[in-house]
Image: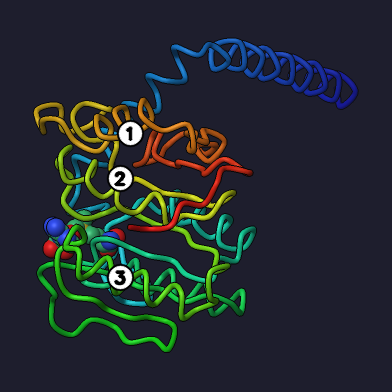
Amino acid sequence: MRKQGGLRSRIFARQSALYHRGRHALYQRIINQDLIRKSIVKEFQRLYYNTRSRTWRNTQWLGVPIIKCPLDLWVYQEILFELRPDVVVECGTSKGGSALFLSSMCELVGHGQVITIDVYPKPNRPQHKRLTYLSGSSTNPQILKEVTRRIRDADGESASVLVILDSDHSREHVLDELRLYAPLVTPGSYLIVEDTQLNGHPVWPDFGPGPMEAVDIFLSESDDFVSDTSREKFYLTWNPRGYLKRVEGSVVRQHP
Ligand SMILES: C[S@@+](CC[C@H](N)C(=O)[O-])C[C@H]1O[C@@H](n2cnc3c(N)ncnc32)[C@H](O)[C@@H]1O
């Protein structure tokens, strides 16, 4: 009797293994189809974005609200570790969560300063020895002059710079920022355009022309940058086509 029971359970185990292997193979076949992957990511991205009070309006870095997707923050961490820029410039501070995150990463890698700019400075923003706040519009010539001066102070003409655009998300403003800040970015470094997901890419379909549309125009007029889609490896990103990498060897233009 016991022998029969043992045989039955071995047959059951074998059948179950075959069943699960078959299911796994079927899953792999389905998930490998580009269209299916894209629609899974798109639906998850919409779910994540549209349930904001649970997700991105409820995200903090060291207790400070941060309006970023954690998967992008991980990519930021990888970029900062790889490039160790002398200066990170962020347009759009809000409550300072992302500025503090960037400063914390610089502290962990033991290198870099962060300059963050906001036209409507909020009270009680976090302090950090690597962080400087500037108040004014990112496209104001005085602000740009101050940013340029601070970059020069950081390491003379050879300071390496990474720029993040996360302020007013209208196409016109982002395009202005792209044109103004691109010359500051050093070859091999990044000009990151946040929230290219807006205007139906794939969230907030009636936002109107925004960061993605600005990127389209900017890339059509500049050969110095390419969209580095390898930074979209986690599938979900708030910055599709927004990780703009300055081509190695492109001439660093002086800012007017
Ligand atoms: C999306 S929030 C920034 C979020 C922040 N980087 C984070 O991840 O927590 C956009 C910010 O841009 C600021 N802003 C809007 N227009 C601006 C401009 N012309 N120049 C600078 N900042 C601007 C707003 O005041 C707002 O605080």
Q: What residue type is disc 2 on?
A: Arg
Q: Residue 60 carries which label?
A: none
Q: What residue type is disc 3 on?
A: Thr
Which of the two discs, 3 and 2, labels the residue nearer the N terminus? 3
Q: Mark 3 points at which residue?
A: 116
Ligand 1 closer than 8 Å to label 1 CB? no
Mark 3–mark 1 distance (CA, rounded to whole Å): 23 Å
Ligand 1 closer than 8 Å to label 3 CB? yes
Q: In this view, does 129 lie above or below 226?
A: below
Residue 251 place in picture, x, y as percent: 55, 46
Could you tell me which residue is drawn at 15 percent across and 27 percent down? 205
Residue closest to the eye, 35 or 110 = 110
The image quarter in which residue 175 lies: top left
Which of the two discs, 1 and 2, labels the residue nearer the N terminus? 2
Q: Which of marks 3 and 1 is in front?
A: 1
Residue closest to the eye, 81 or 45 = 81
Residue 75 place in picture, x, y as percent: 51, 51
Q: Mark 2 points at which residue?
A: 179
Ligand 1 closer than 8 Å to label 2 CB? no
Q: Name the residue under label 1.
A: 218
Q: What residue type is disc 1 on?
A: Phe
Q: Is residue 14 above or below residue 255?
A: above
Instruction: Tell me if I can see residue 57 in this picture.
Output: no
Could you tell me which residue is drawn at 13 percent across and 75 percent down? 121
Q: Is residue 25 above or below residue 134?
A: above
Could you tell me which residue is drawn at 54 percent across and 17 percent down? 31
